Image (cartoon, rainbow, N blue to C red):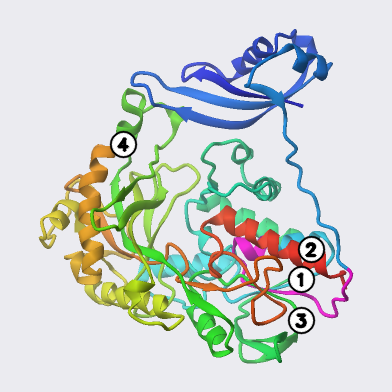
């Protein structure tokens, strides 16, 4: 096939006219065009008063070589090969079925790849299936009654199930395409294959993960919910099994550990078993909430209400004078700020959008980087304890009932406690308490957020809007630890057969990168072992 890049279309042009542009670019007649597919769509809103859609398309034509010889343009080249290639199976004997701990993106995709190759994995998920999990989460949001094993962090699909379902990633890996294709097979919209900023939305993602689970089972895998790994059994320097719910043991020599960034009790088990863990930098801050229409106007100017553009997003970063970085993360257009706690007495926020992104507010994490030098301890889990400290302060500040502490941006910048909300209505459930967020964040984070707000407002007009709402705290943007693994085998460096994977292990930072890491770990196992 031929790949054509940089096809520009005005915002008012019908997408069907892309066919005419293909014919013109390749200088061919309509009967010579066999088919075409959109590979990527992006938006160019850099010039005031003009917005273009930019397309990259893959085209199948008659006499392809003749066409390529005729066209001398950097925009017209042979299409690269993106088809996923299975790794060659290894020769070592695998006596037991591999066990996957955790059913977020890393665990799901590791299980799918292993199941597709006939390895019949067993997936252990401490939380519940997505339907029961949704009931538990809604109960928490509406009443403040938390289920510590079935919540926004734990359960089928992992933390990403209750998010925007964002599929953007900075990694350059052909496996990313495999991830998107498998999601589409499982029910995600086709548009994620070509959208410049693809997302699924929590409403569709719930159905996608259910369909993926069913595919894994049909291929010979097994999925067990409510199955918390309470011990990792090591003999000598090798894995020999796991203990589940403190009740029964599963014998295995292979464990993929895809536990997510909130499985703190499992981190403690790993540390007790002397599995090598090190501290890792992460970030903390709060959620910031604006009117979505303001973000649309700031980004799209006079085109802000064009339906085809949808809800606008942003990604902002600022380096402070003292060397900290303040940045936005996991921006959710037309979404909600959600309660994301997984333990009693700790308050955590995150953001979520449905596929339509049609809610009144936009929200994003506003974060400041923290690192081992801030933890003031050499303990491998010092970052976890750092998170817990501020989550507990936020819980107390909100009223000890999972209502979130909030403060208006104008009051935050003026060091004033907020006493009433303004034009922006907080979306957080089960409720909020107006207060002063300085009481639940480190001083250096507050200082960097203030400096960041003022300067980011220069990049996105209205970002420091007085009535914008800050909801505290956001502490789980990424894992505070790394379970150290060998760069080639992807096994733990001191326990054979243990494969740390995904965001919780410290090797990914989003749905796609975690899924890719799960695939890489599965491939490492396949390339070493024959299927049982």
Query: Which image quarter: residue 231?
Result: bottom right
Q: Secondary structure at mark 3?
A: loop
Cα separation, mark 4 vs mark 3, equals 54 Å
For marks 4 and 3, give the one nearer the viewer. Answer: 3
Q: Which residues are magenta?
A: 91-109
Residue displayed at 31% across by 78% down: 389
Q: Which residue, given by chain and number where applicable, does mark 4 sit on?
A: 293
Say whether marks 3 and 1 touch (CB < 8 Å): no
Residue displayed at 40% across by 44% down: 333
Q: Secondary structure at mark 2?
A: helix
Q: Residues within 10 Å of mark 2 (few under 14, many from 20)?
A: many
Q: Which residue, given by chain and number where applicable, does mark 2 sit on?
A: 115
Q: Is residue 215 magenta?
A: no
Q: Is residue 427 above or below residue 246?
A: above
Cα separation, mark 1 vs mark 4, equals 47 Å
Q: Which residue, given by chain and number where applicable, does mark 3 sit on?
A: 253
């Amino acid at each position: 096939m031929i790949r054509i890049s940089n096809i520009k279309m005005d915002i008012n042009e019908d997408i069907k006219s892309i066919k005419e542009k293909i014919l013109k670019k390749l200088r061919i007649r309509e009967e010579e065009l066999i088919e075409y597919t959109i590979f990527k769509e992006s938006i160019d809103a850099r010039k005031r008063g003009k917005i273009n859609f930019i397309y990259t398309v893959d085209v199948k034509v008659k006499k392809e070589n003749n066409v390529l010889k005729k066209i001398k343009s950097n925009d017209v080249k042979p299409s690269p090969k993106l088809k996923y290639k299975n790794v060659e199976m290894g020769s070592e004997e695998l006596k037991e079925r591999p066990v996957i701990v955790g059913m977020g993106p890393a665990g799901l995709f590791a299980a799918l790849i292993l199941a597709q190759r006939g390895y019949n994995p067993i997936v252990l998920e401490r939380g519940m299936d997505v339907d029961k999990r949704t009931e538990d989460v809604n109960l928490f949001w509406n009443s403040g009654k938390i289920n510590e094993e079935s919540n926004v962090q734990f359960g089928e699909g992992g933390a990403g199930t209750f998010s925007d379902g964002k599929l953007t990633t900075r990694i350059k890996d052909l496996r990313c395409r495999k991830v998107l294709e498998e999601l589409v097979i499982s029910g995600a919209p086709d548009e994620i294959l070509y959208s410049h900023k693809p997302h699924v939305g929590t409403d569709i993602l719930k159905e996608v993960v259910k369909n993926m689970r069913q595919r894994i089972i049909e291929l010979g895998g097994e999925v067990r919910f409510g199955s918390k790994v309470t011990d990792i059994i090591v003999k000598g320097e090798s894995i020999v099994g796991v203990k589940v719910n403190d009740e029964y043991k599963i014998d295995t020599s292979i464990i993929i550990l895809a536990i997510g960034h909130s499985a703190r009790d499992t981190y403690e088990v790993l540390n007790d078993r002397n599995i090598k863990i090190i501290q890792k930098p992460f970030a903390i801050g709060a959620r910031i909430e604006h009117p979505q229409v303001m973000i649309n106007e700031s980004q799209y100017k006079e085109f802000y209400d064009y339906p085809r553009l949808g809800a606008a997003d942003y990604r902002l970063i600022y380096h402070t004078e003292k060397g900290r970085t303040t940045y936005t993360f996991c921006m959710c257009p037309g979404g909600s700020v959600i309660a994301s706690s997984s333990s009693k007495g700790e308050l955590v926020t995150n953001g979520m959008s449905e596929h339509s992104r049609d809610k009144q507010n936009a929200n994003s994490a506003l974060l400041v980087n923290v690192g081992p030098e801030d933890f003031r301890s050499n303990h491998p889990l010092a970052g976890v304890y750092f998170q817990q400290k501020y989550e507990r302060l936020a819980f107390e500040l909100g009223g000890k009932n999972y209502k979130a502490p909030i403060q208006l941006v104008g009051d935050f910048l003026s060091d004033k406690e907020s006493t009433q909300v303004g034009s922006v209505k907080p979306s957080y459930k089960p409720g909020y308490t107006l207060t002063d967020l300085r009481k639940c964040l480190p001083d250096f984070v507050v200082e960097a957020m203030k400096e960041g707000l003022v300067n980011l407002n220069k990049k996105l007009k209205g970002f420091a809007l007085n009535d914008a709402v800050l909801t505290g705290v956001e502490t789980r943007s990424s894992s505070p630890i790394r379970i150290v693994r060998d760069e080639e085998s992807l096994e733990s460096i001191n326990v054979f057969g243990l494969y740390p994977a995904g965001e919780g292990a410290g090797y990914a930072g989003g749905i796609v990168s975690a899924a890719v890491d799960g695939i890489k770990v599965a491939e490492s196992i396949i390339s070493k072992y024959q299927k049982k």
